[in-house]
Amino acid sequence: MDYDLLSLGETMIALTPPQGVSARATSTFVVDHAGAESNTCVGLARLGLRVAWVSRLGADAAGDRILDALAAEGVDTRWVERDAGRNTGVMIKDPAAGVRYYRGESAASVIEPEILDTVPIAESRAVYVTGITALIGPRPAAAALALLRKARGLRIVDPNLRKGLWGSDRRGDLVRPLIAQCDLLLAGAAELEELVGTEGQGHRSESDEALARRAVALGPNEVVVRGERTAGALADGAWHAIDIQRSDVVDPIGAGDAFNAGYIAVRLRGGSIDDALRAGVFCGTAVTTAMSDTAAFPRSL
């Protein structure tokens, strides 16, 4: 089977209290799944693309639930390994306190490059990985680079910088090598400022277009910048931008992953930069209307 996109990364069980209730006060949680790469795969699968997700999960009920959920979405999980000695990671969403991760000794934290040995990477039209994979452990970081180096199709990276992970204190040093190996970079404006912005500035000091042009110097030939009110893309030297308008936001988590799926879907189908930006904004806005990273992702553009 030929794939439109292969991805590598960790997915966790996500526990969310009912809307308007804190984790401390609730007696029930909504059980879901969450992971940057698998979120994007779910979006692409809903839009009709052939996708596969590569990872490790614990040999536990949480891992079973994740595999069942992704399979139901049409995501191929045949290259997911199970680990009887390590657990599946957990994420708790709390409207009052933010997001907490319990993934330090998870099965995915020891993903190794060898997991890719039988994966048909060179035959896939695209591969996708985020900086989170480089930050959860030294072996996953090596696997992320291996995925990009083995690819012959479009190589896509989202920096997805996060605090509190194994490599967070040196996240720029760990994520920049991924950027140097990619063709398409999809990044939030603030994290791009951290990675390529003017040194010594404690605030946003450059426009999104200027940041994109700096990022191109690192290796990618197409750079997308997701801001709070605009989304823009630099390709073939030209800057394209559109406004973002959101209302009825229930949960913003997952919006970036959904944007990425919409944008990637259009570009893989030969669509224009402007159409891809519109699709990204449409998908990113849609998922913010539900307390789930993927539940409200659309099935058509």
Image (spheres, grey):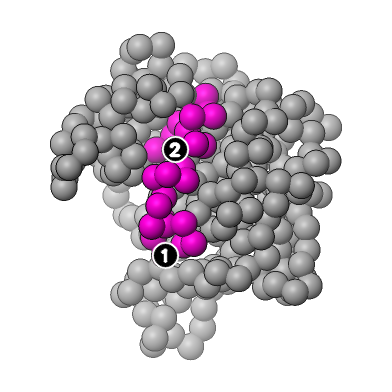
Does residue 167 belong to the magenta stretch? yes
In the rendered image, the vertical position of residue 69 relative to residue 147, given as above or below: below
Q: Position of residue 253 (x, y in %)?
A: 41, 56
Whether residue 257 is visible here, answered yes or no, is no
Q: Given this view, does label 1 or label 2 mark the residue nearer the observer?
A: 2
Q: x%, y% of residue 142?
A: 62, 46
Residue 108, picture quadrant: bottom right
In magenta stretch: residue 34: no
Q: Residue at x 60, y 71 (%)?
A: 105
Secondary element type, mark 1: loop
Relative to residue 234, is residue 245 drawn left or right? left
Q: Split into 4 quadrants, where in the image is the N terminus?
A: top right
Residue 155 visible in this rendered orientation of the protein: yes
Q: Nearer the viewer, residue 48 or 115?
A: 115
Q: Which residue was labeled with disc 2?
A: 176
Image coords of residue 185 (percent x, y):
45, 31
From this view, report whether residue 241 is shown above or below residue 133: above
Left or right: residue 214 compared with residue 36: left
Total count of labels: 2
Residue at position x 63%, y 68% in the image: 106
Query: Magenta part of the protein: which range?
Result: 162-187
Q: Which residue is mark 1?
A: 164
